[in-house]
Amino acid sequence: MHGGVKEENVVDFSISVNTFIPDFIILEDNLKYEKKYTYVEWIEEDFRKIFGEESIIVAGATEAFHIIGWTIMRDASVIIPQPNYTEYERVATFSSANVRKVWILEEKTLKFEKLLPVIDEEVRKYGKVVLITGNPNNPTGIYEDISKFIETIDYLYGDKVTFVLDEAFIDFVSKEKIVPIDIDKFENVILVRTFTKILGIPGVRIGYVKTKKYKSIFEHYRSPWAIGGMGYGVIEQIIKNHQEYKRFTQNTATYYHKERQKFTEFIQFPSSTNYFVCHIGDEDKWFELARQNKIHTRKMHDFGMNGYTRIGLKSQQENAILYELLKQHRKEL
């Protein structure tokens, strides 16, 4: 189960995409590419000049995960810290030898050290481990500096452990808070990123992977035309307007930081993104109240978090309506 709602005239807080689209993204201008074949290799050289030589364009994070699931995870024990994006478990079942889920959310923080004995056990048993996680975490929005954790695992196990870090929401995090992962130093780290979330265009599936060690795998297994003409055009616009893109991401992070502060009393975990988790208690009462007010938020049963809802922030006006509804719900509990 993912976010989204089919009904019209409902304010959908269940999705976690940017409510703003940058001015330089003009989707109508990209319709010309829908009538021709577009090869990602044609723009990848220019893309790499901006995003790094180790970058490989893919059709969003989903294509990256599918490639990982059928290749890098093959015959490995896949460790998935919990709670986390539910798609990880599905792709882990494609070809892995084993899947281990470990709950690491305690006292409003993610305790990655709880994974140490599990990693040791799985390395001894299977000889090959893939650890996949979101950073920032989905659903909590927590961003952690996990560079020291990666360094420890790399020192202890070397190439027996591969990290897949899903950074789909990294552009919503304030730049001063981000600690980049050095993929030159840690060759067993794969970074997965997407433009879908930050650009507010979930219907256009474009993203990229950063890795040196596994670069050829992604180039070999990605679909030739998966990003489509529209995706090709959007990437071209990002390249041509890269400085504007950087300003847009910075302004976006600032906006959502300010909006999150308005919901401090309802935020269950210290989110650094455009979404947060709220404890609602009586789910039936909350979702009925939300339905009556044409508002939709995300249920969290699939995350193993009953009694909570995930909220993706939107415009100031829409957020203000949601805030009043949350206050009303709290009074009625």
Image: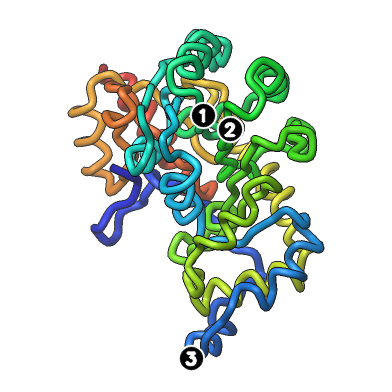
Front in this rendered view, residue 177 or 223: 223
- Amino acid carrying label 3: it is Lys
Residue ID for mark 1: 131
Single out the mark in the foreground, 1 or 3: 1
Residue ID for mark 2: 163
Looking at the image, tell me whether mark 3 or mark 2 is earlier in sequence order.
3
The answer to whether marks 2 and 1 mark residues whose Cβ atoms lie closer than 8 Å is yes
Under circle 3, the secondary element is helix
Under circle 2, the secondary element is strand
Residue 228 in picture, x, y percent from top left:
49, 75
| Quadrant where the image shows the C terminus | top left
Single out the mark in the foreground, 3 or 2: 2
Residue ID for mark 3: 35
| Quadrant where the image shows the N terminus | top left
Within 10 Å of the Cα at label 3, are there few (<14), some (14-19), or many (20+) other Cα atoms?
A: few
Front in this rendered view, residue 160 or 193: 160
Looking at the image, tell me whether mark 1 or mark 3 is earlier in sequence order.
3
Residue 305 in picture, x, y percent from top left:
32, 22
Within 10 Å of the Cα at label 2, are there few (<14), some (14-19), or many (20+) other Cα atoms?
A: many
- Location of residue 142 with respect to 242 vertically, above or below: above
User: Residue drawn at (41%, 48%), measured in percent from left and top?
Assistant: 70
- Amino acid carrying label 2: it is Phe
User: Residue drawn at (43%, 40%), measured in percent from left and top?
Assistant: 74
